[in-house]
Amino acid sequence: MRVATLILFLFLGQWALGQADITIIDKDTKDPLIGANVIAKSEGNSIQLITDMDGRIRVELGYPLELNITYLGYVPMQVKLAERTEDLVIQMIVDEMNIAVNPIIIANPFLSDNVSFNRKEFQVLPGAYEDPSRLILKAPGFSTSNDQANSILYKGMPSNFVNWTLNDGLIVNPNHQSNAGTLSDISSPNAGGVNMISAQVIGSYDFQSAPYSTPRNNSIAGNSNVNFSNFNNSYLNLSLVGLEAGLGFEGKKLPGFQANYRYSTVGILTGVLGLDFGGEEIIYQDLFTKFDLIDKEDTQLSGFVILGKSHNYKDALAEKDSVKTFKDIQDIYFDSEIILSGLTFSKKWNGLSLKSALNFSAKEDQWRSEIDDPYLLRGVHLKQTVTSALFDFNKRNFHFGANMHYIDDSRINSRHVLTGTDNNGVGFSNFNIMPYANYEWQTDKLYISGGSGLTFNSVTSHFNLEPHLKVIGQLGNSLEAEIGARRNTQILTASSFSYEFKPEEIKALHFEGILRLKKRKYTVFMSAFSHHMNNILMEKTSNYSQYTGLDHPLMGEYDYSGNARSQGVSLGFSSMNLWLNGLSLSANGTVFNSDYGRDGNFDLNNTFDFENSYNVIASYNRPLRKDKELVTSISYHVRGGLKEFPIAAVAGSTNFMTSYDFSSAPVVQLADYERIDFRIVYNLRKGNYRKFAKSISLDIQNLANKENDASTDIDFLTGESYVRKQLGMIPILAYRIEF
């Protein structure tokens, strides 16, 4: 890899004595760079400094002064100062050619409601499974329902309160094997086993949790947003997740180009080589292409197309003596096709900038199960298309524009048992548009962001005002306070449920307050939050609510009298180089309750009312030689168990699905969920050249091999209930080489 050195000369006068306060930040995100190494030289004297949690250092040497700044994953800089400069801010550029990564940034992104990971971070943190959205459970208030999928549960709210976005524009569920980890083995609307957007082409991932600001897309809990890498390169990446090849070049006279093709490793083993994985075949593949059509200082235009296809087949056991559960006698088929495409355009004029995105995405899933004796066919056919657009103008901290999308969504359920046939379909189309305006104002000690959007959707023909406010203030040299509030709405897609219903918008009001004590080598934070939701669908004769995240095949009459809330507190600590250079420690805990009811009451615990969740994360970066490094990281996550409705009698299960007694409440709690993740990464590159740079990593999810509880199910073969278990240890060995 070729490392560029940027030399910045600031000649401001004659030789002087004194101190310099300097802040080092990321040029694109403006985030402080924690732990940057600075060697300051003046008149034969030199000192080595490390930036603190605010990215700041204080240099007390004479002038002229030379600063040599290095930070793992960024282009090295040399800065020369002729005389003292007040509060100098130095912006570093990400070196995307460098496969080296910096795990110590885990100390910083978990201190705000917008949790983000750049490419350098999700390539080394443990439990990533080459999917940055799987890392989110290490942040305060987050968890997942099942190890097999990347579903996101935020502060006890269901996963279908989360949307996926690409460049801040809404898209369909972008995951292969969207039936993985679901209670019914049928497609999830927003999760899956493997993200079809490969980690090799992702530049950054951020979860924009409520109360987020405009122009974020409307979803009650938050948005999983993906941005592509701006660097085009060629490589091979081999892992258990998939075998990948990338081809790219930086355009000069011709447009820049990046392509990536991936085929599942398990698919090769079970399909091509014919190895037996318990009678199951798992195949997925995807092709990514991106063109940088215009790449100028003030104008950028790029387009992309991603095609994905997956197939999952499970064969019924041939040996009847080996049959233990009802699933053992079923043939199960799942097929899925996905397309993601779009354009992004940005332009800068004098004092005005435009950021825009246009996305088109479509998904089709087909699932069915068959039994030969007696013959049974049960299937689901899901189709969804989403077209979305974002136009965001910024003029001197005044943002205005519009975020819009059109959804066409349908689901057909079929069941044939002996001589009977049932077919029913649900679906709807919705156009949603939200024009907005937002203003940001900032001084040395105060930051205020406020504005509002006005949402209209064609399903209900309602207008909804959605204001937001965020205030951050310095209460002292080390203490910072933040408050945020937001009102938003969301319409759940019809294909999320098997029953037919007329959608209405769920309305929510969010509040959060955060205190941060920021010292040179550590930060302590505390937050309190409250999320109130109303106008939620509930069955009139039971305690079933869409807030529970469950399906209800025998749905009766319903209304929108339901309401819900999630409230609690989070505490956290993060440190960098506190006892040892290169060592980072982070810990956080959240205590909350998530409950629901009707007509203003909150007397029912939600299924995802885990009550508490805790995380501990440690990472150590050890440089071995100039061109080698070893990064080791480990994390521990624990939360309360899932709460379930009691299981109904087997006699009410003619759909051959586990049915719940919704006249009760979710009072059956499973065991606590916990797991340890571990990752070790070895990076090697030849001098200052990226050619043949190599990276070897071992990422182990659930190191202790604990089989956590997934759900309580009915075995229709025996008529007895049992606790279905999640996956145990999953080791992912990966090798990457760049050309």
Image: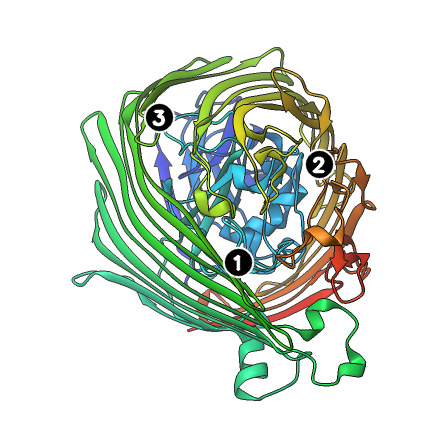
Q: Tell me where residue 723 appears, x and y as whole percent.
A: 80, 55
| Numbered disc 1: secondary structure | loop
Q: Given the image, on which type of amino acid does mark 1 rest?
A: Ser
Q: Of marks 3 and 2, which one's residue comes earlier in the chain? A: 3
Q: Which residue carries the number 3 mark?
A: 12
Query: On residue 575, which mark appears?
Result: 2
Vertical relation: 609 (above or below) 277:
above
The extreme front residue here reads 419
Name the residue rendered at 26%, 39% in the picture: 356
Residue contact between numbered discs 1 and 3, judged by CB atoms under 8 Å? no
Vertical relation: 668 (above or below) 229:
above
| Numbered disc 3: secondary structure | loop
Q: Given the image, on which type of amino acid does mark 3 rest?
A: Leu
Name the residue rendered at 40%, 60% in the picture: 364
Q: Of marks 1 and 3, which one's residue comes earlier in the chain? A: 3
Q: Which residue carries the number 1 mark?
A: 178
Q: Nearer the viewer, mark 1 or mark 3?
A: 1
Q: CA distance from mark 3 to mark 2?
A: 36 Å
Q: Nearer the viewer, mark 3 or mark 2?
A: 2
The answer to whether residue 374 is left or right of residue 319 is left
Q: Tell me where residue 678 appears, x and y as whole percent.
A: 73, 58
